[in-house]
Amino acid sequence: MSITTIVFIILSVMAVGAALMMVSAKNPVHSVLWLIVVFFSISGHYVLLNAQFLAIVNIIVYAGAIMVLFLFVVMLMNLNVESEPMKNYRLQLAGVISGGSLLLVLLSALMKVQSTPVQTNDGDVGLIKKLGMVLFNDYVVPFELSSILFLSAMIGAVVIAKKEK
Amino acid sequence: MDIKAYIGLSILLFSIGIIGVLIRRNAIIIFMCIELMLNSVNLLLVAFSKMHALGIAHGSPSLASDAQVFVFFIMVVAAAEVSVGLAIIVMMYRNVHSVDINFLNRLKN
Amino acid sequence: MSNVLESVWVIPIFPLVGFIVTGLMRNYLPKHLAAFIACSSIFLSFLASAYVFYIVKDVTSNPAAIHYFDFINTGALHIGFDFKIDHLTSVFLLIITGVGFLIHLYSTAYMSEEQENDYAKYFSYLNLFVFFMLLLVMGGNYLIMFIGWEGVGLCSYLLIGYWFTNNNYNNAAKKAFIMNRIGDLGFLLALFWLIAKVGSVDFATVNAGIAKLSTFDVTGITILFFVGATGKSAQIPLYTWLPDAMAGPTPVSALIHAATMVTAGIYMIVRSNVLFSLAPITMEIIAVIGLLTALLAATIAIYQNDIKKVLAYSTVSQLGYMFLALGVGAFSSGVFHVMTHAFFKALLFLAAGSVIHAMSGEQDITKMGGLRKKIPVTYITFLLGVLAIAGFPFTSGFISKDEILLNVYNHNKLYFYLAVIGAVMTAFYMFRLLFLTFFGGFRGTHEQEHHLHESPKAMTIPLIILAVLSVIGGLVQLPHVFGGHPYFSEFLNPVVKTVEHTDPKLAMKEYVLLIGTIIGLAVVYFFTKKNYAVNKYEGEYHGFKKVLANKWYVDEMYDAIVVKPLLAVGTFFKNVVEKSGIDGFVNGIGKAVNYSSRQVRLLQSGQVGAYVLLMVIGILILFIVQLFL
């Protein structure tokens, strides 16, 4: 039981627990907060794997920007616990069962996977330098295209949310 | 660390996300569960990239960085998608004054 | 010689060509051309048949079959398209083409009032009929015979229903065809049985292979063949179609229902005489049914008022005599009676047609009378025909009927006496017909009397020829006793074993029959002349006579027992099975589709949540299939 394994287990428990709380929380604001916890734990996993760049980007983009956006919208709607609608019981049951079956199927598929070790703590794969080299040498075109994507998303968001006069 | 552990963790988070989508009626919560699913996939990809970095058994080192670049792009797309999606939900709220997906049945018949 | 015989296929080809030409070109052929084509085709066949006869008569053994091409070749069953030309065949060929030609000639005048295309249609049907009949008698195996058998049935239907605008005629045609068909079923079953046991339908093979058949087999096969014969040759129980078939034109009645088609049954049994000789039970049955039919039909004929119906029942009766002859084993006598019957019955029918023609279409004898001065040629030929059928000494009818009676006497005395009674009745109703038609005062309308005229030459010449044949045609079989020589049965000897009886009392029996005939005829003549050469004839019958006049109500009986239940079954099937069952099933499928689509439509609720659920389930299934199956 190396320290790596222990850290892994702690982070995993945190992630899964937070996810479960997120799914079952009645108050939407609580859901958002629990999701942020999930993001943090996933970033912890990234650090464990020495993918430093992605860890930081995860925090900044996801937990910082996207979740704040969600929070804005939730506050805008003024959603409360009382007005939170719940699906009827049967449909919930159906959902749980199908999701659970999917889980089981995938896990049983996992049994056939051959064990392969993963490099943790070390390695220069996740470092910014290496990543930058790959990104700007091999994947330049998708990089530029993603800027266009952002442009269209921005314009789209503004147009859709505009109040009609 | 074995790759199997990471695969298992990713599967778990993914299915929790699916269950969340199926259970909740609030459109925003559903959206967030989708984000959860995306993140589980990201985690898996990073784990695979490190597996390839080792070069043992099934790993091939040349693929290692590609996986992390892929994760980067997934985040990009997720960000764009969230902004547009939330804009739509806001628009809908203005019309129907509710974010309950049961009221969004314009696709009926 | 066999080389020449191989080209006998021309004999049926002539009428076939005639059929095709007159049939296809019926809208373009003028009447005289259609008549010429049809008559000449039959005449050419007649010449060819005469040549065949000339060749065959010198052959003493049984000629082999002529193989043209393989007809059916499956597994163990090989049936060729064979012709067998032997003495029996050549006799029938001469009868069919000879009498057929005369009738064609007669029809050219009789049917002259028809439209042009109908006229040509008539002749095409007639030629087709002759073709099939030739196929029947020339066939070298049962299958070819069956082709001809069915074909003549078809032509009979076509020709009976020739004036198809009249529904009654159509019903008569249908009745003829259906009753034929019932008999054909018997024929087919016998055929199948033969194939199963002997493995071939070839005449030679069957005759050689009779050792393979047990008594039960032979009896069964022959009985089934006889059922076919009762249908085709109008014996009890399948005879009621023949009187109704008088709805067709008179030459048709003469050709088909007197001279040729109805004799197909006789031909078939004689052809299979080897088989039948081995089944004494069947022979007895044939004799009994023949006798009963002869008597029944004779009783009905006594009180019929339609000239053609009398002749029709007479035909049934005479056919009964032929079967009686076959039943007691006198095969060549049966064939001889076929020949003489062809002569005098065709003559009688054609003469009746001449009378009808003269009476402007009237067929009821109660409305005729005293015609002998007005249409003398018809009268004389008709008289000769009546004498022949009644058995006036030394006419053809006398010789053939006496031969049959003698053979019956040697077999069973009871049958003999009954047959004699039948012969007396025959004479009785024929003389009644003669006197009512040609003697006494005229009982028709003034208009009819005005139009009375002798028929044209085309009609009278065949009458004269047939009359001559009816009188002298029997001399080929004149018994030794009267100074003749039985050429006919000698001719048929290679094919049919004649019952040669060296009977010491033969001469005496012949003389007894001769004297008995003369006495009987005299009695009948005077009795009928007194009662029927009259000025007024009611034609209404009461009591027992009514039963006879109404044909013993046999038709009504068949209607009640067979036809009505079948119709009821058909109606049941139509209403219950068809409407509720099949329609219900088909409509039900439509309704089911409708219902299910309505239910499926509810799936499209527009609820996003439901869609997502279905999506997840789909992915689940895909995963399972991919990973574990």
Image (spheres, helix red, strand yellow):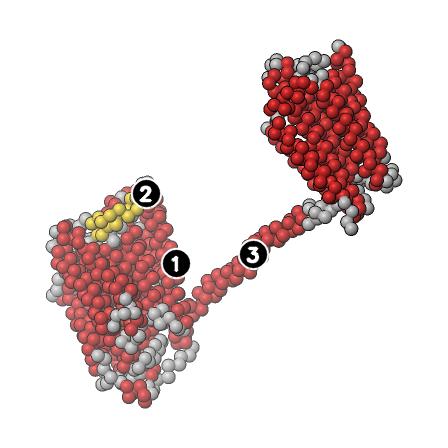
x and y percentages locating residue C194 in the rendered image: 32, 47
Q: Which mark is residue C142?
A: none
x and y percentages locating residue B74 in the rendered image: 68, 29
Name the chain letter of the residue that bears numbered label 1.
C
Residue pointed to by mark 3: C583
Mark 1–mark 3 Cα distance, whole angstroms, equals 32 Å
Mark 1–mark 2 Cα distance, whole angstroms, equals 28 Å
Q: Earlier in the sequence, mark 1 or mark 2?
A: 2
Q: Which mark is residue C74?
A: 2
Whether residue C415 is visible, yes or no, is no
Question: What residue lies at 53% left-to-right and 60% top-to-bottom?
Answer: C574
Three-letter code for the amino acid on which mark 1 is drawn: Ile
Name the chain letter of the residue that bears numbered label 3.
C
> In this picture, is C514 found above or below C91?
below
Q: Is residue B3 left or right of residue C386?
A: right
Question: What residue lies at 54% left-to-right and 57% top-to-bottom?
Answer: C578
Q: Which mark is residue C182?
A: 1
Q: Are marks 2 and 3 in contact (CB under 8 Å)?
A: no
- Pick the residue in front: A144 or C179: A144
